Image (spheres, grey):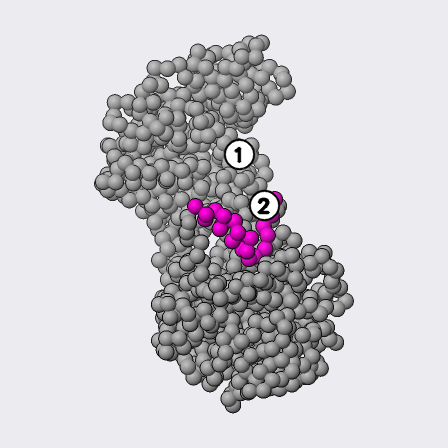
Amino acid sequence: MTMSRQGVQPTEVIDRAAKLRFRWNGKRFSGFEGDTIASALAAEGEHIFSRSMKYHRPRGILTADYWDPNLMVQVGDDPNVRAGHRLVRNGMDVRSQNAWPSLNRDLKAANGLLGRFLAAGFYYKTFMRPQWLWPTYERVLATFAPGGKIDIDTPHGYHDKRYTHPDVVVAGAGPAGIEAALAASTAGARVLLVSHEHAVGGHLRYSSDAGDQGALAELRASLDASDVEVLTDSTVTGRYEDNWLGIVQRNHPIAVERLIKARAKVLVAAPGLIERPYVFEGNDRPGVITSGAARRLINLWGVKPGERAVVFSANADGDAAAADLERVGTEIAAVIDARSGGQISSTAGSSRAVEAVMANGEQIDADLLVMAAGWTAPTSLLNMAGDRPVYDPAAARFFPSDPPSNVLSTGGLAGDADLDGLRQHGVETGRLAAARAAAVRHRLQARTARALPVDGDEPAWAVDERAPLGRDPHPELFRADTHGMVDMSEDISSKDLVAAAHEGYDSVELAKRYTTATMGPSQGKLETVNTVAAIAEARGETISQVGTTVWRPPYAPLTLGALAGRSFEPVRVSSIHPWHEANNVTLIQAGQWLRPDHYGDPQAEVRNVRENVGLIDVTPLGKLDLRGPDVPKLLSLLYVNKWMKLGIGRVRYGMMCAEDGVVLDDGVTGRLGEDHYMMSTTSSGAGGVWEWVENWLQTERPDWQVHVTPVTTAYASINVAGPKSRELMSRVCEGVDLDAEAFPYMTVREATVAGVSGCFMWRIGFTGELSFELHVPAGHGCLVWEALMDAGSDLGVGPFGLEGQRIMRLEKGHFIVGQDTDGLTLGPSTGMGSLIKLDKDDFAGKPELAWAADRPLPLIVAIQPDDPDVVPEEAAQILRGDTNEILGRITSSRFSPTLNRSICLGQVEPHLAAGGTKLTVLLESGERISATVIDHHAHFDPAGERLRG
C-alpha cells in the first residue's frame, strides 16, 4: 500500500502555505494546516498506525474519521487520541500505542499464534484457579492492557461548562441538518446547530461533485447570514428526559473541552449515516478501507490512498470513490459490483499490507481494497429518547420507529433522497421543530409561577405533515463466505460471535457483553449491524428477530475533566439588573450574586433615603414559602423565640441558632394565610437555611404537615425606604390600605403594585426608616422598579445600593450574621438575650443556649470613636490599655453622613459592654485610639420612631 500527497484538490481543507512539523514515534514528519494526524502521516507514506487490542495485528486507516478504530494514538501525555479526527499541530509529539518494543516490530504479536486459546470469553474461563495466584495473573495481564499511557503528573488543563436553553438543537450539520436549522431560525426559533466534524457540510465536504460543492457554499453563506449558533467539532453526547442534552465542544478557544448542558424544546437528530465495513477474511489488513475513507483522503487532504485498487461497491458512494481514485491516478484493477451479485471473499498478502484480493473466484493484484457495503444509521439520540429502531431488509439498515413528538429526525437517518430532496425534508423538519418549540415555549412561560404573562393562547401542537423520505433498495451485505473481523476495536471476529451464540449467548445484549463486541472506542458505530447479522446467521433468524443493542449516553467520549467542568460559582442577577447596568451602577460580588454597591455616591444615597425616599434591590434575600398546619411548630423549632400565636397578617423577627447555640441566621417571617407563611433569610444564608429546614423535616419531624418551596428567585424584592415611602407606594398600589394604623410596623399585606397582582409587602425597617419591603413576581421586577422611579420623580426618589444600606443599618445598630457574628458567636452574645425563650419546648440549640445563659460571653455593642473623623478598620483589635491583651474587635465601621461621625459595632468582653465604657482600639497603622461604648445598639433613632412612622 503506497499513499502519497497529490496536487491541489478543489475541495481540500489544508493550507499548503502553512507547513507544520511534528514527530511520529520519534521521527520528524511534516503536514499542513488542516491535516489530521492520520492524513499527514498517510501523505508521508505511513500505512501502519496501530496494533490491534488482543492479537497485535498491524492496523491501517479504515474510515479516516472520528470513528476509525485503527487510529488511536498517544499525543504527548494525552492517550487514546483519535488520529483520524485530531488536527495536527506544530511541535506535536505523536506515538503509537499498544505495541512493544515498536510499532513495526511488536513482539506481542505472538498472541496471534495463541489465537485459538484467546477466543471470546476466555478471560471468564481462565486464571480462576488457584485463587492465590490471581495477583500474579493480574500483573501479567496488565502488561497486555491496550491503550495509551497516563502520566499522573500531567498538569491539569482548563475545562469549561456552559448552560443554555435554545428552542431547537439540531444534532448534525449535513445538508438536511443545516436546512433544518435555517428554517427553524427563520421561523423565529433560537437554534443551536452542532457539527461533529471540524466544519459544517456533512458528506458534501468530501464530494468532488460540482453541484454538491455549489450547494455547500450556498448553505454556508446562508448560515453565516443567519442567527443560528453553530458549534463545530462538537457532539451531542446524550439526550435525557425532556430534551436535557449533553454537548461536548472540543474546539473551545481556551478550554481543553467544554461540556454544554442544553435544555432544548425540540431536538432534531440529523447525524447522517455511518459507513460500515464488510466482514471477510483479511478485512483488517492495512490497505482495506471504506469508500468514505478514500474520498476523505483524496478530497479533503489531497492524499492518494494507493496505486492499484479493487473497489467493492454496492451503492453510489462506492462508484464515486472509484471515480475519485481514477482521477488522482490510482489504477482501478476491478470494480466488483455487489448490486449485480459481485462478491469478494478475502485479501492476500503479508500481515502488513494488502497484496491481492480474491473476488468472484479470482485473485486480483492490488494494494488497496475499497469497500462500499452499506450503512449504519446512528439512531442513538432517538434510542435515548425511548425509540427502538426498526430494521428494513430492503434498505439493509435500521430506521427510527416512533420517537417522542419533541424529537424529530431528518437526513439519511430518516430515509433516502437526492440532495434537493434531503434539503427540502430538512426545511420542513426545521419549520415543524420551530412550531412545536413555540408551543412548548408558550406553555413553559404560562405555567411558570410569577413569570411575565404570555401573549395570546397556546399555539396548537403542530401536526407532522412532512412528506416522508424514501428508502433506496440496498443489498444486504454483512459477511462474505469467509470469516473476518467484526469489531476491530476489540479484535472480535465473526467466528467469535458464532461461537458465543452456540454457547448459549444468543441474545444480542448477552453476546455483546460476553464477547465485548461493540464495546470498544467506536462503541458500535461501525460494528453493531454486523454483530447483529452474525448472531442472526448463527441462530438462523432474521436481523429483525434478533433486534439491536441499545445505544446509551455518551454517544461520543468526553473527558472526566469536561464532566467536572471548571471550578465556578454561577453568577446570579436579579430581573432588575438591566436597569442597574444602565444607571451608573458599581456592582459588588455578594456570594453568587452581582448586586448594586452604589450608584456613584453612597453617602448622598443615605442622605436621600433619610430625607426623601430610596429604592434598593434586595432580591437575593432568601425566601421560603411554607404551607401546612404544622408550620408554627417548625418555626418554633428553628427560631429561638415563640411562634405559635403569630396572627394572620403579622410579621415577626426571628434568630436561628445551630445545635451548638451558634448564631446561624436571622430574618423575618410573615403569616399570609391560615396555613401559609413566608420566611425570609439573609442573602448568604438562603441555601443553607433551606437545607437546614428540610433536614429537620425529613429526618426529625417527617410526620409534620409542612411543605417548603424555595422562592428566592421567584420574586424580585424591592425595599422602598424613607419618610416619603408611603406617599410613593400609595401612587402605585391597589387593594391595600397603607395608613399607619391599617398597615402598622411588622405586618404583611398582599396587593397589586403597578398593575401587577400577586405581590406582597411587609413593613420592616432594616435601614431604620419608614419602609415597605415589596416582593413582586420576578418576571415583573424591572417593570415595578421603573414604575416606582417614575411615580416618585417629584418626591426625590433615587436608588441606593448595598453600601448605603450597610451605613444605615449600622446607624440603626442592626447586626449582620457572618460579619458581626462568627462561628463562635452564641445567641446571647448578640445582645438579644431576651429574644431567646428557654421556657418553650425543645428547639434547635436550646441545651447550649441554656448553658450559655449564665456564662460571661462576649457581647455585641455599639461603639463610637472619640475622634469622630477616625473610622477604625473592620477587625481592628480592642486592647486593654497600653498592653497587647485582646478584649474584643471592631466588627463593622463606617462614617455616618446622618450623624457626621464615625460609628461602629464590635464584640467586647462582658465587663466592657456597659454604656460609657472607654475602649482602646488598635488601628492597622499601629496607632491606638480611644472609643466609647454607647447605651444602645442604635446610633440613630434608638426609640424607633422613624421606622414605625
Q: Tell me the number on the disc at residue 152.
A: 2
User: What residue is at 61 percent from the left and 66 percent from the top?
Assistant: 58
Badge 1 element: helix
Furthest-top residue in view? 882
Residue 667 in percent (x, y) is at 38, 34
- Label count reads 2
Image quadrant occupied by the N terminus: bottom right
Q: Is residue 719 visible?
A: no
Q: What residue do we see at 31% from left, 23% from top? A: 847
Whether residue 592 sits left or right of residue 402 in the image: it is right
Q: Is residue 868 left or right of residue 659?
A: right
Discs 1, 2 touching: Cβ within 8 Å: no
Mark 1: which amino acid?
Glu
- 442 over 156 or under it: above or below: below
The percent coordinates of residue 370 (x first, y second) are 60, 79
Instruction: Using the image as rendered, state which of residue 456 and residue 61 is in the foreground.
Output: 61
- Between the residue at mark 1 and the residue at mark 2, the CA separation in whole angstroms equals 47 Å
Q: Which residues are magenta?
A: 132-153
Q: Which residue is mark 1?
A: 803
The nearer-to-camera label among 1 and 2 is 2
Q: Is residue 575 placed above or below 228 in the rendered structure? A: above
Q: Position of residue 210 (x, y in %)?
A: 65, 82
Residue at 37% x, 55% y is 448
Identified by mark 2, the residue type is Ile
Q: Out of 355 and 806, give the one closest to the viewer.
A: 355
Quarter containing the C terminus:
top left
